[in-house]
Amino acid sequence: MDFGLVLQTDRPASRVVGLMRRAERNGFRYGWTFDSAVLWQEPFVIYSQILEHTRKLIVGPMVTNPGTRTWEVTASTFATLNDMFGNRTVCGIGRGDSAMRVAGRRPHTLARLGEAIDVIRDLAEGREALVDGTPVRIPWVTEGRLPVWMAAYGPKALALAGRKADGFILQLADPFLTRWMVAAVRGAAEEAGRDPASITICVAAPAYVGDDLAHAREQCRWFGGMVGNHVADLVGRYGEYSGLVPEALTSYIKEREGYDYSHHGRTGNRSTDFVPDEIVDRFCLLGPVDAHIARLRELRAIGVDQFALYAMHDAQESTIDAYGTGIIPALTD
């Protein structure tokens, strides 16, 4: 199993770079960041510094979207980093949540997202692609490589990930839901004539190592609120009891009353009072080292290839170090 560290690009950027360096020293292979231009600093600028100050770490957004930047700009940015540092990037992409809504825009359609996946990958790897009907190729790209991993929850999005993406990002660590969603992605891949095993499965969730479970829950409760945004979209589209989305995912948002993006992904977010302890425990990894190892082994048995650790809490360094000394070695064959 691989491990990734997920951060917001808060200022100063030097701290983001420093935490990524610490993660690499502790055995993490991936460095991810949020990508929301209004709420945080521009991640691609910071990626260049992370890549410069690490040796093998692979970096990318968790997640970008088809609309913040034009597709040829996104592809050229990835290709430039790869040319400078040797194909050490990955493109995590989704419909767009905070990056779009904070700027007054709606998330993109799945059709638009699917088209963007193909175009960005083709351009970043040196192939010609149609950008809004115009044939485009980036002529200086040679030997480029850009895996594109798609974030998804709902049935249509999961099917799109299975048909198009090189990897699937699931932003929660509940084994029951992970099993259901991985099966949906791999089933769609098989129907499309792809090898289901070729799709990398990445589970991303907060992890907090420590014995004070009540404190850990309060530090990570924001995650249930963030996931609730996507769940609310699913309920609006499919209905709470449609049978197309597991009730284990949708039932907890009944008391949800809007969302404040100014506290997006942060401890103390006032828009997460509706999130019960049970959801925090199911969606996140909390507790002593042994509890993390047990959950990760369960996820690995389902087929998870990478666990990406959200570290937006008050124990960033100690959690990174605990993973490096006691958890990553236990999950690395």
Image (cartoon, rainbow, N blue to C red):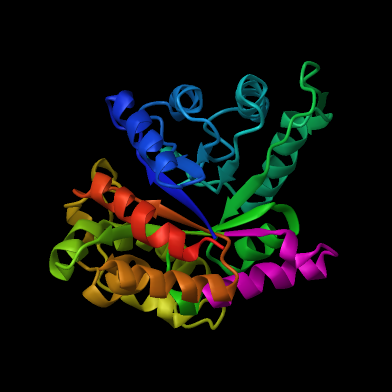
Instruction: Please state if 180 lies on the left or on the right of 185 as rendered.
Output: left
Q: Main secondary structure of the magenta part?
A: helix
**Which residue occupies the foreground of this view, 201 or 305?**
305
Residue shown at 27% from the left, 77% from the top: 278
Q: Is residue 186 visible?
A: yes
Position of the N terminus, as image quadrant, is bottom right
Can you give x and y, in whole percent of width and height, for residue 190 in the image?
79, 69
Q: Per the image, is 121 magenta?
A: no
x 34%, y 36%: residue: 19
Give x and y (percent) for residue 319. 28, 53
Which residue is situated farthest in the top direction here?
Answer: 140
Q: Is 332 or 52 nearer to us in this picture?
A: 332
Question: Which residue lies at the image location 52% right of the left edge and 32% below the top edge?
Answer: 68
- Is 110 above or below relative to 153? above
- Residue 256, located in which quarter of the rendered image? bottom left
Residue drawn at x 40%, y 75% as measured from the top left: 294
Q: Is residue 140 above or below residue 92?
A: above
Residue 179 forms part of the magenta stretch: yes
As displayed, is residue 43 above or below residue 255?
A: above
Q: Is residue 253 visible?
A: no
Task: Examine the image and state in which quarter residue 142 appears.
Answer: top right
Q: How many numbered callouts?
A: 0
The magenta region covers: 178-201
Q: Nearer the viewer, residue 117 or 133?
A: 117
When the figure is inspected, residue 332 is found, relative to residue 17, above or below; the finding is below
Tell me where residue 31 appears, x and y as whole percent: 47, 41
